[in-house]
Image (tube, rainbow, N blue to C red):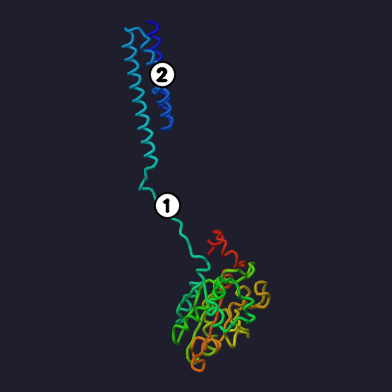
Amino acid sequence: MERLKDIGEDIRQLQNEAEELLASAKNEEEIEKIRVSFLGKKGKLTQIRKELPHLPPAQRPLIGRLLNEAQEKISQALATRRSLLRALSREKERVDVTLPGIRPSLGRKHPLTQVIDRIKEIFIGLGFEVVEGPEIETEYHNFIALNIPPEHPVRDEHDSFYITDDILLRTETSAVQIRVMESRKPPIRIIAPGRVFRRDQVDATHSHTFHQVEGLMVDKGITFSDLKGVLTLFSERMFGKDVRMRFRPDYFPFTEPSADASISCIICGGKGCRVCSYTGWLEILGCGMVHPQVLRNVGYDPSEWQGFAFGMGVERIAMLKFGINDIRLFLENDLRFLKQF
């Protein structure tokens, strides 16, 4: 009889122990460990059940009933705890649709894209068309048609990333002008924005990859005065009406006469400062009248058609407009820099 009392007490203690452990179980893994510990093949209640055959026959029904009741209550506690944890989990995952939404962060245009868009806007307003061309060019379109034969000295600065003997990454978007003139008859008014590639050593003002906008106008009776008028209007709309423009003789193989165009320093107003090297002027582009040989190369008669061309580096314009002192900042993708624009 004493043996029966002890076994019954053990069963009740095991039941209470299991229920207490389940009450503090925090996840499904802990619940499963408790189940195995009490009801598994080697569980504590299972071990007591294995002793039934060794008990007196009169005691077996009572102990069996106690074991079944304990097992049922532990199983119920297991199920209850599982249901509660699942309900709490669903509650955490539930979305309260009455709460304010999370406003997505908006991106912004890269400063170079902003400048290119502004350049396009200005020249479209002047009647120019925006055209694009391939970044991988033939030697003919990139050099020869622009009056730069293989032995020309200017090749030393421009010969760069060749794919084959006569295919290379374009060194300027002037090649687009050639392609347009080959496919159309005048009059022509175009600008050609895009990436170009040269073997420049990377530093604060140079990069092997940068952006250009080349412009071209071909018609009858075009003079240098037309070129000056267009570029002066462009500089005023890009940098402000107080900006003055200066043209000085220069040399480019594809224009004659040629000039470099500078604006009065937007930092000091032309008085002289460190940015303009105390000259009061900032060079922004090269330009000139289209060379007669270039017109002949595309099948135009220089006695009938005249034109002007110009080219500017977008990074140069952006650095002046935004006061940026290092071209490498445009390519580093540093959000701290980009978010300023």
Instruction: Check disc 2 and report the residue beneath it.
Output: 14
Q: Would you identify the image quadrant in which residue 208 lies?
A: bottom right
Query: How far across and how far down the image is residue 3, in percent?
Result: 40, 7
Residue neighbourhood size for the residue with mark 1, other residues' Cα within 10 Å, grouped as few (<14), some (14–19), many (≥20): few
Residue neighbourhood size for the residue with mark 2, other residues' Cα within 10 Å, grouped as few (<14), some (14–19), many (≥20): some
Q: Residue at x 67, y 73 (%)?
A: 273
Q: Residue at x 43, y 32 (%)?
A: 29
Q: Is residue 157 left or right of residue 196?
A: right
Which label sits in the foreground, 1 or 2?
2
- Disc 2 marks a residue whose amino acid type is Leu
Query: How far across and how far down the image is residue 30, in percent?
Result: 43, 30
Instruction: Check disc 1 and report the residue beneath it.
Output: 102
Q: Would you identify the image quadrant in which residue 183 lies?
A: bottom left
**Which mark sits nearer the N-terminus, 1 or 2?**
2
Q: Secondary structure at mark 2?
A: helix
Classify the position of the N terminus by image quarter. top left
- Disc 1 marks a residue whose amino acid type is Ile
| Front in this rendered view, residue 261 or 50 | 50
How far, Cα to Cα, is label 1 from label 2?
A: 50 Å
Q: Is residue 327 left or right of residue 90?
A: right
